Image: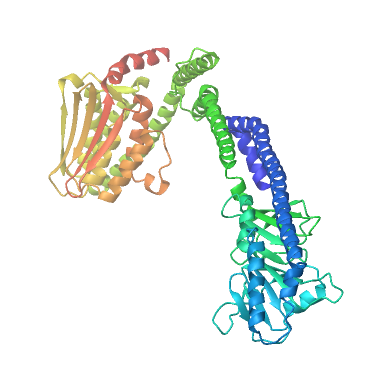
């Protein structure tokens, strides 16, 4: 049941698979009919072949009956010949010259008689008193054994009727010649001589029938070398066969006469066609065994042709299903894939379309919908820009308490170590710094105003550290009038002093430079302090990269130490877009360089926008 559920699931999800199944279902009746026609043709072939073969077998068996009848009549003629009976009337146990002369004449007589029948290979008369055998081929043979043998007893019991003797052994007499009675290649018909008399004699007439001749008369029944034929007498004894062993390995008596049976042979496990006919006159039976594969040799190409047609039909069904899928279902699949991409947020998706039909119209409609969606989202983004600036002000407000804390801390340590005059100077610079920070609501300063604003803060730090470092300002002519966010450089300067120059006893240098290159405003804050260790520098660079693209998931345990740097990256990313970037380059022991890269066109627009917002306020 599990596989059935999976099959239904695939059938519902895949149009191509469903189309293929439908085409195969259409072909199913054709395949079933072809298979039925094949099986039916085999049955008809078996029936026709069986009827024809049975007819041929009946004719062959009838010919065998006629042959045996002819030999039977010939034996009657010989056995009732009074002249032969007279010549065989000698009763001496030892042959005399007269008996030999008479027996010679008997041999000549039976030779002349039997020459007319080609199925007779030999004719013999057994003379009981002298235990001699008169044969047409071997002449006069004297048998040494005096005891009656089984074949002789059978002939006596028949009381003049003809019987058929099958030899079960092969013997040779003392002269080295084979005994004709025990020749397994011969079927011997026996009967008493002169059987019409009331007192029947003891001499026996024996006519040898060649088994090879009988087998040749049946050879026309053999369709091929694998076919086997068996001839049985009325006592179900095997008379002759073309099989090598001349024995059957299975029970054949249950095969009804005139019937056709298909059965496997124990030796090869191969199916065979078995046919049997029985003579109503003699009771003899003829059994024919033909391998089924040989029978269907001629019809097998037709079966293979039918199977090829079925296979070709299946291939055509699959190909047609694929053709229809590529023409109809494939564009639908592309539309589904495009919708999935659109749902994931890929608004730049666009499907290729070269069709002019209904599916082409749907594809064009999808592309237009995606384009409209992209424009709508862009409009919404612009509408939400003010909300983003509100967040910017929040981030900007966070820097003032931080700075105020550090400044008050500096005043505390200065008051502890120096005279009150220095403290007053620091406080004066501090007040000027905050006065410019307020700047009547403006959000940006020019580069020149920014340097002036920074100088108040740097002067406080120089007093604190007893002028252990100097400061350099350098702004290119084309950067003087450009605007940058308020308090954007102060965190970088603060980090340079507190984390870079603080440990130097003297000779510290702080450099602040601005320049315009390729329509980009480049701001550099450089110190020759202790630098940043490489593991920490890599962490800072990764954190800045994440914040640049809107990921604020920086670990809080490291956030506090470099809060100012992360704050600056967040502010420029929100205010100047994704192209704005803060880079930190440092080597431990050789100082640090902080670089802010801003689009110059945005810096030129800041003044007008700031004044407009101030006027609105």
**Left or right placement of residue 18 versus residue 262 in this view:** left
Find residue 524 and report its horizontal and vertical position in percent.
Answer: 21, 33
- Residue 475 to residue 247: above or below: above
- Residue 155 to residue 327: above or below: below
- Give the residue furthest to the front: 98
Find residue 117 and report its horizontal and vertical position in percent.
Answer: 65, 58
- Residue 286 to residue 26: above or below: below
Residue at left 79%, top 77%? Answer: 201
**Quarter-of-image position of residue 573:** top left
Q: Is residue 425 visible?
A: no
Residue at left 72%, top 59%? Answer: 68
**Left or right placement of residue 321 versus residue 559 in this view:** right
Find residue 433 and report its horizontal and vertical position in percent.
Answer: 29, 30
Along the viewing direction, whichever of 541 and 405 lies nearer the viewer: 541
Along the viewing direction, whichever of 200 and 302 lies nearer the viewer: 200
**Left or right placement of residue 266 versus residue 366 in this view:** right
Q: How many marks on residues?
A: 0
- Give the residue furthest to the right: 198
- Give the residue furthest to the left: 507
From the image, which quarter does the C terminus lie in? top left
Find residue 77 and report its horizontal and vertical position in percent.
Answer: 75, 63
Along the viewing direction, whichever of 364 and 69 lies nearer the viewer: 69
**Quarter-of-image position of residue 169:** bottom right
Residue at left 62%, top 35%? Answer: 11
Q: Is residue 272 visible?
A: yes
Q: How are the residues colored?
A: rainbow
Residue at left 29%, top 42%? Answer: 411
């Amino acid at each position: 049941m599990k596989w059935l559920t999976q099959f239904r699931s695939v059938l519902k999800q895949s149009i191509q698979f469903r189309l293929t199944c439908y085409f195969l279902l259409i072909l199913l009746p054709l395949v079933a009919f072809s298979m039925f026609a094949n099986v039916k043709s085999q049955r008809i072939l078996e029936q026709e072949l069986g009827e024809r073969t049975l007819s041929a077998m009946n004719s062959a068996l009838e010919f065998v009956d006629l042959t045996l009848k002819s030999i039977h009549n010939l034996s009657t003629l010989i056995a009732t010949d009074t002249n032969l009976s007279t010549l065989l009337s000698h009763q001496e146990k030892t042959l005399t010259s007269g008996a030999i002369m008479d027996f010679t004449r008997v041999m000549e007589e039976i030779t002349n008689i039997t020459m007319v029948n080609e199925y007779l290979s030999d004719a013999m008369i057994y003379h009981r008193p002298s235990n001699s055998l008169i044969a047409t081929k071997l002449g006069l043979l004297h048998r040494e054994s005096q005891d009656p043998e089984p074949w002789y007893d059978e002939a006596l019991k028949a009381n003049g009727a003809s019987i058929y003797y099958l030899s079960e052994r092969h013997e040779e007499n003392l002269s080295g010649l084979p005994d004709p009675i025990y020749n397994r290649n011969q079927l011997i018909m026996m009967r008493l001589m002169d059987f019409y008399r009331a007192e029947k004699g003891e001499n026996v007439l024996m006519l040898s029938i060649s088994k090879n001749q009988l087998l040749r008369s049946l050879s026309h029944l053999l369709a091929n070398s694998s076919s086997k034929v068996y001839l049985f007498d009325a006592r179900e004894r095997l008379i002759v066969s073309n099989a090598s062993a001349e024995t059957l390995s299975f029970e054949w008596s249950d095969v009804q006469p005139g019937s056709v049976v298909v059965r496997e042979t124990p030796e090869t496990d191969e199916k065979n066609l078995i046919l049997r006919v029985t003579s109503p006159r003699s009771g003899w039976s003829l059994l024919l065994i033909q391998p089924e594969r040989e029978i269907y040799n001629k019809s097998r190409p037709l079966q293979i042709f039918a199977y090829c047609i079925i296979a070709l039909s299946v291939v055509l069904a699959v190909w047609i299903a694929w053709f229809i899928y590529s023409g109809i279902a494939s564009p639908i699949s592309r539309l589904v894939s495009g919708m999935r991409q659109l749902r994931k947020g890929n608004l730049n998706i666009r499907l290729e379309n070269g069709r002019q039909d209904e599916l082409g119209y749907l594809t064009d409609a999808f592309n237009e919908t995606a384009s409209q969606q992209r424009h709508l989202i862009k409009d919404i983004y612009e509408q939400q820009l003010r909300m983003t600036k509100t967040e910017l002000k929040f981030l900007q407000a966070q820097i003032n308490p931080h700075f105020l804390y550090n400044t008050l801390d500096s005043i505390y340590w200065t008051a502890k170590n120096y005279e009150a005059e220095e403290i007053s100077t620091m406080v004066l610079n501090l007040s000027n710094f905050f006065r410019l920070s307020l700047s009547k609501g403006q959000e940006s300063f020019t580069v020149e105003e920014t340097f002036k604003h920074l100088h108040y803060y740097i002067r406080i730090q120089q007093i604190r550290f007893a002028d252990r470092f100097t400061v350099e300002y350098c702004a290119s002519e084309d950067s003087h009038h450009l605007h940058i966010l308020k308090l954007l450089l102060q965190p970088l300067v603060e980090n340079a002093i507190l984390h870079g120059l603080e440990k130097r006893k003297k000779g510290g240098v702080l450099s602040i430079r601005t320049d315009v290159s390729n329509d980009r405003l480049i701001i550099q804050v450089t110190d020759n302090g202790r630098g940043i260790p490489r593991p920490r520098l890599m962490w800072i660079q990764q954190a800045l990269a994440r914040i640049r693209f809107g990921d604020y998931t920086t670990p809080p345990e490291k956030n506090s130490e470099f809060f100012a740097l992360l704050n600056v990256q967040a502010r420029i990313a929100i205010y100047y877009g994704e192209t704005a970037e803060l880079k930190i380059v440092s080597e431990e022991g050789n100082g640090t360089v902080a670089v802010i890269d801003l689009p110059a066109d945005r810096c030129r627009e800041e003044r007008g926008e700031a004044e407009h917002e101030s006027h609105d306020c």
